Amino acid sequence: MTTLAIDIGGTKLAAALVDDALNLLERRELSTPASQTPDALHAALRTLVSPLFPRADRVAIASTGMIRDGMLLAINPQNLGGLHNFPLADTLSAMTGLPVLAVNDAQAAAWAEYRALGDDYRDMAFITISTGVGGGVVHNGQLMCGTGGFAGHLGHTLADPNGPMCGCGRRGCVEAMASGRGIAAAAQGELAGCDAKTIFTRAGEGDEQAAWLIHRSAQALARLIADVKATTDCQCVVLGGSVGLAEGYLTQVDAYLAQEPQAYQVRLQPAHYRHDAGLLGAALLAQGDK
Ligand code: ADP
Ligand code: BMX
Ligand code: ZN
């Protein structure tokens, strides 16, 4: 069977045809529309999947937001151009005529990365540092989704009670400081208006403010990881997303984590499936693997 896997992020939309052996047969990518209207997302998804779905047997979606009964409910609507909710499964079902499974992007990625770890692992966490900060937890071999889909939203735990407002309505979330948007939002002076990718480039060129913004993100991440270790006693934490996978980032997080007491130390590694972890995790779940 061939799965049309779709990954809906705050910055980019990706889609790929995936076979049962998890090979990516064809992959496409578009920017996520910044409009607040569901119509814009609908149109972008149609453009993305139209060339692919005639060759697919089912659809598997990994999407930013809390996914409940096939609906996308934003915790942080700012990450989706202000869009609060969107009928994800119904939209793709009407568009393709195929059966549809939808799951949160970080939960999906956690499952793919857990399966890539091997038999010695039962407890792990995946954290994406991307437009937002998302998370997925596998506990005793089971992917935690929660009764309402909110489980593992690690980016909305508290980093600093005096920190910046988060788009979820809470002050000082990890996401508000450590995510791509959080890094960009704190930039001042000549870096004001730059995105996180540009800030990483500037840090590489020796810009002190850029380096400080990235350190602040890595430090918030390390504290989050120590909290996750204390909550789940996970055997490893896998980092993904374009910020999480950026050169040198994981090493900085690891260095901050090393400053925590021994009990909070945990193995950190980059996502085995790199930027495709969400796509492949959704495909695996649609294959009935869980
Ligand atoms: P999404 O959130 O849509 O899944 P990404 O994982 O690509 O997408 O994350 C988008 C964020 O990552 C943006 O804030 C962007 O500026 C930043 N980014 C993209 N590429 C890089 C890079 N090479 N290095 C550092 N940050 C990056
Ligand atoms: C936000 C939240 C999570 C998501 C995470 C990473 C929304 C719309 N999204 O915390 O559900 O997993 O961002 O998403 O509330 P990404 O767009 O950075 O991949
Ligand atoms: Zn928040």
Image (tube, helix red, strand yellow):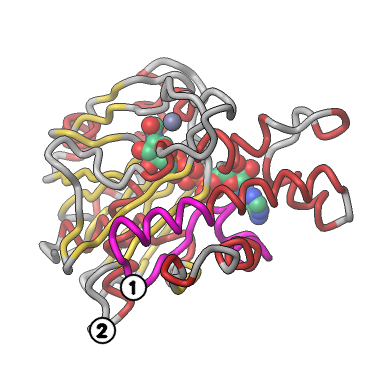
**Magenta span covers which residues?**
222-250
- Outermost residue on the top side: it is 37
Check residue 237 for magenta coloring: yes
* Of the pair 108 and 98, the residue shown nearer to us: 108
Q: Earlier in the sequence, mark 2 or mark 1?
A: 2
| Above or below, 243 relative to 191 | below
Picture quadrant of residue 250: bottom right
For badge 1, the amino acid type reads Gln
Magenta-span inclusion, residue 217: no
Which numbered tag is attached to residue 120? Answer: 2
**On the picture, is 103 further left or further right than 236?**
left
| SS assignment at label 1 | loop
| Residue type at numbered disc 2 | Asp
Query: Pointer 1: what residue?
Result: 235
Q: In the image, is residue 93 above or below residue 268?
A: above
Using residue 138 as the reference point, say whether residue 35 is left or right of it.
right
Q: Residue at x 60, y 35 (%)?
A: 182
| Residue that protrudes farthest toward the front in the picture | 261
For ligand 2, give the image quadrant: top left
